[in-house]
Amino acid sequence: MTDSDLHGKRAIVTGGASGIGLACVKEFRRRGAHVIVADHHVYQTEAVAEELGAEPWVVDLADTASLEEVRLDVDILVNNVGMQRVNPIADFSPDDFRHIQRLMVESPFLLIRAALPGMSRRGWGRVVNISSVHGLRASPFKSAYVTAKHGLEGLSKVTALEGAPFGVTSNCVNPAYVRTPLVERQIVDQARVHGIGEDEVVEKIMLTETAVKRLIEPEEVASLVGWLVGEAAGMVTGASYTMDGGWTAR
């Protein structure tokens, strides 16, 4: 991959103002792409876009009704936006469950629906869905998140099959815990439901299943995303790439 191999390509990254999304925006800009930063934080989205020479799109992706008529003229779509709630099923808010499905399954469907016709016409496209190890494995107290990530895996595979005749690939990236604001915000809830101290959560909960005992850095995820959107990955589609420190090797 060169510093200009994405020159002339248009990319959109959801949740692009922080965490994995921000790392992907930086990766794509470094390689010459025009990048649209899609996020709901007005100031943060606009600040990131201005700093990196990207285009801001301030949007609430959980408001899926507003996305039904959207059309996207992009070559690369990264579905990254996500949220987390940690609670036993019996105590899980139905509103929270529905909100997470809208944000993390329905909105990726609508964005793929909006982008796929243009990709197909041009004969080239890359869809990368930021899934999770929880798209392949379950953990207690995360019914909505695990359900959404499993749904995203299925959506990605169907997109791969429908896009294949037109040069469009679709893949998932499946990291374990990444050092992001989303993960940091889980610590209080994880401590509560597991009955442990907040200082014990990373070691006893987040790293217990991994062989490599550290959090993943956002830039590491972005490097894999970056390869998947490049020319060398043209035969890679319908796949789920783990970056989980050995979690799923067990």
Image (tube, rainbow, N blue to C red):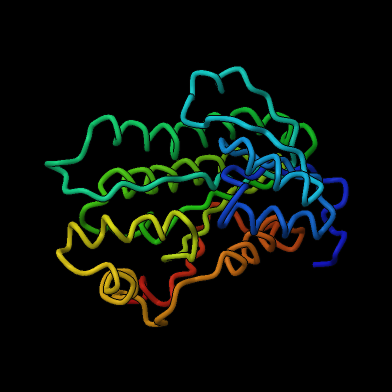
Q: Is residue 146 left or right of residue 46?
A: left
Q: Is residue 180 left or right of residue 191?
A: right
In the image, what residue occupies the spot 68% across and 47% down? 126
Q: Position of residue 200 (x, y in %)?
A: 27, 74
Residue 39 versus residue 234 in the image, above or below: above
Residue at the bottom extreme?
212
In the image, what residue occupies the spot 52% across and 52% down? 130
Task: Report which quarter residue 221 is drawn in.
Answer: bottom right
Q: Nearer the viewer, residue 173 or 195?
A: 195
Q: Quadrant of the C terminus?
A: bottom left
Q: Quadrant of the N terminus?
A: bottom right
Decide if residue 164 is in sight here: no
Q: Position of residue 110 (x, y in %)?
A: 54, 29
Disc tally is: 0
Q: Position of residue 82 (x, y in %)?
A: 46, 45
Q: Is residue 48 left or right of residue 217?
A: right
Decide if residue 147 is in sight here: yes
Q: Is residue 150 left or right of residue 220?
A: left
Residue at the left extreme?
90
Q: Position of residue 36 (x, y in %)?
A: 72, 40
Residue 215 versus residue 107 in the image, above or below: below
Q: Nearer the viewer, residue 57 or 98?
A: 57
In the image, what residue occupies the spot 72% across and 60% down? 27
